[in-house]
Image (cartoon, helix red, strand yellow):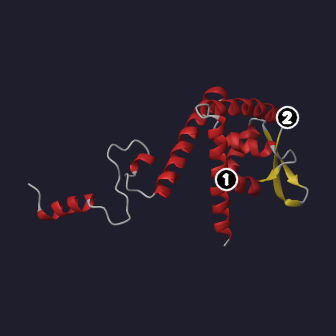
């Protein structure tokens, strides 16, 4: 038998507040956690997030299987590949949007394996720059080719027009978000 208090909690939990989406039944992913009454902006955000997560899960899996590496290691090496002169640890952290401690841990591992080297930054002798070694560049080049093929394959279900339209629209959203953060 249920008490009046528990009965009130149950009915209150199922009654949506105005403007608040009700979670859908049988939630499979974040996107599906919203109901049909959700605001389109929220639904779009969750679709973007879910799609990003699905792509990242597959990239992580393939990097682990094919190269015995992780996505953060790949990302750090990608940043360094774009800057052969090397990057300061603080700049790597900013570009990767992770803490300095995370970057240090990844750089330590890659240095032990001979894929990156640390040098005193000539512009600031108190600062250390990290750069790819020749072995690191060779490994990254192989991983980058595979990574590009995987992404192309994952997006293969979309036509070129679909991809171009999505790219353009997401570019508008990106610019809007960037502009709104400048205010």
Residue 67 drawn at (x, y percent): 67, 29
Residue 51 drawn at (x, y percent): 54, 43
Q: Quadrant of the N terminus?
A: bottom left
Q: Which residue shows up at 17% across the image and 61% down it?
A: 6
Q: Is residue 26 left or right of residue 129?
A: left
Dot 1: few (<14), some (14–19), or many (≥20) neighbours within 10 Å?
few
SS assignment at label 2: helix
- Res 3 visible: yes
SS assignment at label 1: helix
Residue 128 drawn at (x, y percent): 82, 54
Q: Is residue 32 left or right of residue 91?
A: left
Dot 2: few (<14), some (14–19), or many (≥20) neighbours within 10 Å?
few
Which picture quadrant has residue 58?
A: top right
* Residue position marked by numbered label 1 in the rendering: 171
- Mark 2 or mark 1, which has the lower sequence index? 2
- Res 30 visible: no
* Residue position marked by numbered label 2 in the rendering: 134
| Direction front: furthest residue | 161
Q: Is residue 41 left or right of residue 127?
A: left
| Direction right: furthest residue | 122
């Amino acid at each position: 038998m249920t008490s009046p208090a528990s009965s009130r909690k149950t009915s209150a939990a199922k009654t949506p507040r105005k403007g608040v989406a009700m979670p859908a039944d049988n939630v499979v992913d974040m996107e599906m956690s919203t109901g049909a009454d959700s605001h389109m902006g929220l639904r779009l955000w969750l679709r973007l997030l879910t799609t990003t997560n699905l792509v990242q899960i597959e990239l992580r899996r393939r990097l682990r299987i094919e190269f015995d590496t992780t996505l953060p290691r790949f990302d750090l090496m990608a940043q360094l590949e774009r800057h052969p002169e090397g990057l300061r640890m603080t700049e790597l952290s900013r570009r990767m949007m992770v803490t300095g401690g995370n970057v240090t841990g990844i750089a330590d591992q890659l240095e032990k394996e001979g894929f990156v080297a640390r040098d005193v930054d000539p512009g600031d002798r108190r600062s250390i720059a990290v750069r790819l070694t020749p072995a690191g560049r060779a490994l990254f080049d192989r991983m980058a080719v595979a990574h590009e093929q995987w992404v192309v394959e994952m997006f293969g279900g979309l036509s070129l027009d679909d991809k171009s339209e999505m790219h353009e629209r997401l570019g508008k959203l990106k610019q809007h978000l960037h502009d709104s953060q400048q205010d």
